[in-house]
Image (spheres, helix red, strand yellow):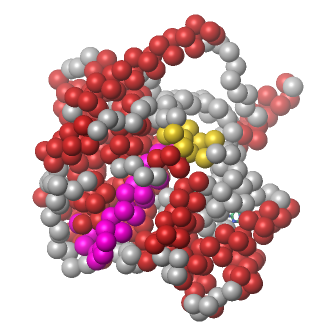
Amino acid sequence: MSILRNEIKNNLTQLKDEIDQIFAGGRDTVLSEVTVGQVYGGMRGLTALVCNTSFVDPYSGLHVGKYTVEELADRFPEEIFFLLCTGKLPGLDFLSEFRNELNERAGVPQYTWDMLRVLPEDTHPMSMLSLGILSMEQESVFKKNYLKGIAKADYWKYTLEDALNVIAKLPELAAGIYRIRFCDGKLIERDPELDWAANLALMLGLPDSGNEFANLMRLYLVLHCDHEGGNVSAFTSRVVNSALSDLYYAISAGLNGLAGPLHGLANQECLRFILAIKEKYGDDVDESQVKQFVLDTLDGGKVIPGYGHAVLRVTDPRFKEFMNFGKQHCSDDVCYQIANKLFHVVPDILKTYKGGKVANPWPNVDAASGSLLYKYGLNQFDYYTVLFGVSRVLGFCAQNVLAQGLGQPIIRPKSVTNKWVAEKLMEN
Ligand code: CMX
């Protein structure tokens, strides 16, 4: 894996130089002040982390390195992993080298399959994915070498080894979970000639005329790869790895955060929502009926899944990319059309809902993806967050490799009690 390793090394050198310059310019400079509201409000808007793999601009959305999502939509997820780790897109020789690397590292151990097969039948696929990764923890190259004694400067190299081993096994593990949980349990063999996303599509075993589903998988795995450092799953993964718990622990922990309905699980909720509209009003549902359904949902005290975001303040560019794919390949599909109708009615409703309290009335990535997966026969929506997880593991891995390469310390913010805050208020 010489190309990737060398470029990560170069990236780390550059990032270290940048940090040296930043420190020289003022280590004690105040970047962000924290209010009482932020301390009690999920630390929203508090600048307290650095993440160099990607950043989310409230108005232009996700940037990976210097690229916007629109500029990356035609790329392979493997190239995006390279970009996350190195800050640049790879040359032509990378993809074949990476494919060989993954082929050598592929193969989920039998004990993982045995463990997954004995779980209760209704185990959530996200639990299976998290457990599947965790079951392989004893294979951690980082852990084995740490126990022998390794230099701190080399931590990232062993973390990268773990990252590549997990990434190589991930499509097989994810597809196997689908086959065990929702099909006949027979696993489909990977094809060493195929790329990462196409292999996942192949092993899921859904019919795919014209490779459209494989192309959707490529797009899906690119669009969900990373979303800077403060989101629940990435932050959790980073916190765990900062204790030098190896990547298997860190990835499993990040996936557990992704499994929440306010985070990654929202995409399965979105399709459930779309199907509920379809069931209530039929295939010819019009916009006024969609509007009524949305209002009834809000009256029932529920959120509209797929709308709103903690950081974004515009329509998520990733949503637009999915809608473009749908327009090209399945514009006559009912679920796609309902997703489109929701886009026409929800933002105006949310703008005034709760006296304008919703910070972002626009759709996020989850509002569109489910309807496309459903169209291609992936109709087990409990499974959708697994696909999100497969992609997001790229971000977890890149963030942790770079953090180890930069020698970042254990994460340990200070917490205080109500009494402490009340006393602070009295002082002011
Ligand atoms: N429907 C109804 N109400 C919404 C809403 C929505 N889609 N989005 C926000 N609100 C409400 C909040 O519940 C909150 O109400 P209360 O103060 O009464 O609790 C109020 O508006 C203000 O919230 P906010 O500042 O706009 O949003 P947050 O940053 O707190 O939360 C998010 C962001 C994504 C959790 C929220 O918008 C939401 O629940 N959306 C629906 C679920 C969803 O799509 N999640 C996926 C996000 C993408 C991801 O992380 O994967």
Residue farthest top in this picture? 24
The range drawn in magenta is 203-232
Q: Which residue: 49% across, 35% down?
A: 65
Does residue 152 sit above or below 89 in this rendering? above
Q: Is residue 120 left or right of residue 271?
A: left
Does residue 46 sit above or below 80 in this rendering? above
Q: Give the quadrant of the N terminus.
A: top left
Does residue 32 sit above or below 208 in this rendering? above
Q: Which residue: 29% across, 65% down?
A: 201
Q: Which residue: 27% across, 53% down?
A: 196
Q: Nearer the viewer, residue 131 or 12?
A: 12
Tell me the chief SS of the magenta region.
helix
Q: Give the quadrant of the C terminus.
A: top right
The answer to whether residue 269 is visible is no
Q: Nearer the viewer, residue 237 or 192?
A: 192
Q: Which residue: 62% across, 73% down?
A: 340
Number of labelled discs?
0
Q: Is residue 99 left or right of residue 339?
A: left
**Quadrant assignment, res 143:** top left
The picture places residue 297, in percent across and down from the top left corner, at 69, 77
The answer to whether residue 47 is visible is yes
The picture places residue 169, in percent across and down from the top left corner, at 23, 52
As for residue 66 lying within the magenta part, the answer is: no
- In which quadrant of this rendering is ligand 1 seen? bottom right
The picture places residue 149, in percent across and down from the top left corner, at 21, 20
As for residue 205 lying within the magenta part, the answer is: yes
The picture places residue 134, in percent across and down from the top left corner, at 28, 50
Q: Nearer the viewer, residue 105 or 297?
A: 105
